Image (tube, helix red, strand yellow):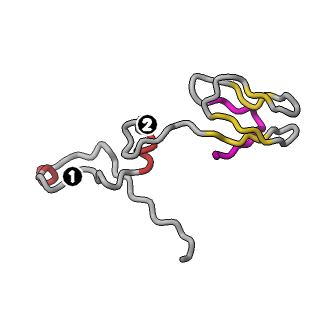
Amino acid sequence: SSGASPPTPFCPPSHKVLRDSDTSPGNMDIDLLNPCAKEERSKHKLKRMIQSPNSFFMDVKCPGCLQITTVYSHAQTVVLCGNCNQMLCQPTGGLARLTEGCSFRKK
């Protein structure tokens, strides 16, 4: 109970060369039950072992008046601060781009 996080599994290179001894029916190139977190994150949201969305809501702090506003990560419109009317984020093709100076945290 020291509070240390469990060790992350080693992520083997995906371009590993197979030898004749590796291709026997009992040996697999990858561990299907414990996929690498890095590889899971890069997969399509429907191809992950457990499907999960790429989008999220976040609390954005206005750099001018320090008011917190909830913003969708893939917002398709410009989001303005309710207090001082400063632009908090602007839309792009995917993730919304936060204005410089804005800080955020995922909800």
- In the figure, 95 relative to 63: above or below? above
- In the figure, 48 relative to 29: above or below? above
- Identify which residue is drawn at 12% across, 52% down: 25
Horizontal side, residue 75 vs residue 16: left or right: right
Question: Percent position (x, y) of residue 56?
Answer: 59, 39
Question: Percent position (x, y) of residue 31?
Answer: 29, 53
Say which mark, if any, is on residue 104.
none
Which amino acid lies under the numbered mark 1 shown in the image of this protein?
Answer: Met
Q: How far apart are labels 1 and 2 at the CA level?
A: 24 Å
Local crowd size for mark 2, using a 10 Å CA cut-off: few (<14), some (14–19), many (≥20): some
The quarter in which the N terminus is drawn is: bottom right
Q: Quadrant of residue 86?
A: top right
Which amino acid lies under the numbered mark 2 shown in the image of this protein?
Answer: Lys
- Identify which residue is drawn at 31% across, 54% down: 33
The magenta segment is: 96-107
Say which mark, if any, is on residue 28.
1
Q: Quadrant of residue 85?
A: top right
Local crowd size for mark 1, using a 10 Å CA cut-off: few (<14), some (14–19), many (≥20): few
Magenta-colored stretch includes residue 104: yes
Horizontal side, residue 19 vs residue 44: left or right: left
Q: In which quarter of the image is residue 55?
A: top right
Circle 2 residue: 45
- Identify which residue is drawn at 39% across, 51% down: 36
Magenta-colored stretch includes residue 74: no
